[in-house]
Amino acid sequence: MSRTFEQEEPAIAIHGLTMKYGTRLIQQDLNFTVNQGDIFIIMGGSGCGKSTLLKHLIGLYEPAAGEILYDGQSYTAGDEKTRQALRARWGITFQSGALFSGMTLAENVALPMHYSGIDKSQIRERVAFKLALVGLAGYEDYYPSQISGGMCKRAGLARAIALDPDILFFDEPSAGLDPLSARRLDELILNLRDSTGATVVMVTHELDSIFSVGTNSVFLDAQTKTLLDTGCPVWLREHSRHDIVRSFLSRGEAGQPMASRQGDKQ
Amino acid sequence: MISFHQDDASHLSITLSGDWRVMNAKSCRKIKEQITSSSSTIRLIPGHDFHWDSQLTAFFYQLELQASQNETRLDFSAMPEAIQQTMTLATAVPPVKPEAGFSKRFAPFYQTLTEAVETLAFIGEMALAFGRFLIGRSHIRLTDVSAALHQAGPQAIGIITLISILVGMILAYLGIIQLQQFGAEVYVANLVGLGMVREMGALMTAVIMAGRTGAAWAAELGAMKVNEEVDALSTMGINAMDFLVMPRLLAMIIIMPLLCIYSFFLGMIGGGVVALGMDMTPRLYIAQLIQSFGVVDMAVGCFKGLVFGVLIVLSGCQAGMSCGGSSAAVGQATTRAVVMAIVLFVVADAGINILFFHMGI
């Protein structure tokens, strides 16, 4: 499980992170680490702040308090140059794919390459390879509107891995996909992790994905606005100290009934 | 029908009988009054011929909210199981506390202040982005500039042609009626020439561009925001200002003066059509027109067009980039872009006129 990937410096370390929207508290005092090579799952019910946490991790939001470190280097306290250098090592796949609708898939995937100093003659080859990796070979000249939602997500993934990132972030990768496509995407994530050695951080509440790829996880609770538990999802399903975590991971069949915890979206 | 029975000092039973599908305001009030009385537990019991629907459960929910404030417990255990289940479900999660009165009351003021600060920040960022472009360190793509140029230029020609000719004609008619009284119809050419060049050409072009291009850009950037494309850009280390706003700003800076010049001449043609209809010879009209304005006036008109162009980009792109995360927010951003642009034109136009008047230009 997660312990097998342990190294001296965690890929990501979160210390006392508190997140707010204006004055509204989302989560407080989060502390956890993501080890190198982990497939780390951020899970919890709707409205608990999973996506917000991801947006803090990728630097889109500033934390109300606390610190986020990458390889021991603080992103939160870093200047723009440090942040830029850290960001260059990440690849991010958004919920909808977030492809630029006015560009073809090839142009989308090539975009980060254009700004990273890669030789223009190499870009075409690299784009074709990255698209092939996600099973979209030959789709270079298609526009996002001409392909399906699942394909858009995979194209988004191709763009995220364009610069061979050290850390890959996913926001609900399998949401809205049919079970087969979701499964294929999970396998793709596993293969990518194995072949590139990248650390993966994934926000999801799809249990199939959580168990098939997750090596470590955190569970955020909307009511207490804290991190309830952390560990390997399979282990948490059986051994979490919290009923709600066990119940969540076993589709409400264990621990306290989920009905009484519903509606926690503020 | 309701009946009350005080079981002991702190326990009250209320029996509801008959048809409760049509709520009786008087009975409801009577029940509510009991909540504020001293009983700590109120038991609700169905009486004979008890009929109910979801309106009654909605009323019970209101009772429950009131009871929780008065530390009274409502006991539904004698009620039909469906009512009990509905009440359990409805009360499982306590309602969110409303915002404090103070912050709610000042919310519109706070929002206006935030928008003003955001606009100022946007102007600053736009200036920085322009600076980066000048020293060649911008993330701008030239293909985007040409796409924006195409959108703002050739695609807008048709509507600008129509409006400019009509505005020229309106100016001519306006002048002719007044000037005829003094037998000075010949000066209608001066009015049209100077009016189009110094004022109406730039203003009308800007209004059309704000409604057409500014709104389109606000919607486009707003949709990109909703679709997380702007987030994707910034996580790729690409400056959204350079990538999305600068091509549009450059396109506007290039195209607005050109469109203004186009509009000036079409307005003069429109005015000419009216003047010719009033027995003025083409030669006289043109001769009078050439006298009416100089290069400085053309420069003033083009400068106004340039300023308005920058204001269109400012209002359109700012509205788009600060758009919320819903589809309704995109609509609001579009409206805001157009309204803000037109208000800014009028303010800027007045300012420029006052300034140039005192400078003697």
Image: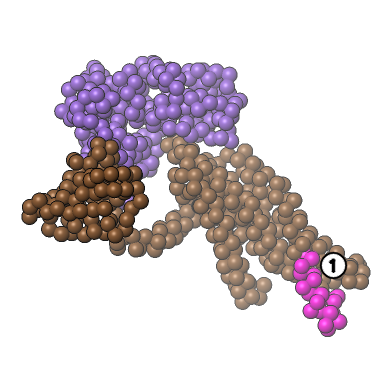
Chain colours: A purple, B brown
Where residue B83 appears, x then y in whole percent? 27, 40
Amino acid type shown at disc 1: Val
Is the residue A175 above or below the residue B359 in the image? Answer: above
- Residue A165, given in percent of the width and then of the height, sits at 40, 26
Decide which of B71, A224 is in the foreground and name it. B71
Q: In the figure, residue B343 lies in which quadrant?
A: bottom right
Q: Residue at (60%, 48%) from the top-left corner?
A: B216
Task: Indicate yes or no whether the magenta region holds residue B178.
Answer: yes
Q: Nearer the viewer, residue A179 or A197?
A: A179
Q: Is residue B62 magenta?
A: no
Write down the chain letter for disc 1.
Answer: B
User: Which part of the image, by quadrant, shows the C terminus of chain B?
Assistant: bottom right
Q: Nearer the viewer, residue A222 or A26?
A: A222
For numbered disc 1, what is the local secondary structure? helix
Q: Which residue appears farthest toward the bottom when viewing the image?
A: B182
Tag 1 residue: B274
In terms of secondary structure, what is the magenta stretch mainly? Answer: helix
Residue furthest left as drawn:
B9
| Residue A202 pos. (x, y %) | 35, 28
Q: Residue furthest front?
A: B48
Query: Does residue A99 appear in this view?
Result: yes
**Residue B58: where, in percent of width, then height?**
31, 48
Q: Is residue B279 above or below residue B266?
A: below
Bin the neighbour count of mark 1 within 10 Å (Cα to Cα): few under 14, some 14-19, many 20 and up: many
Nearest the viewer among A42 and B4 is B4
> In the displayed structure, would residue A201 be above or below residue A84?
above
Stretch of the chain drawn in magenta: B168-187
- Residue at 44%, 55% in the rendered image: B118
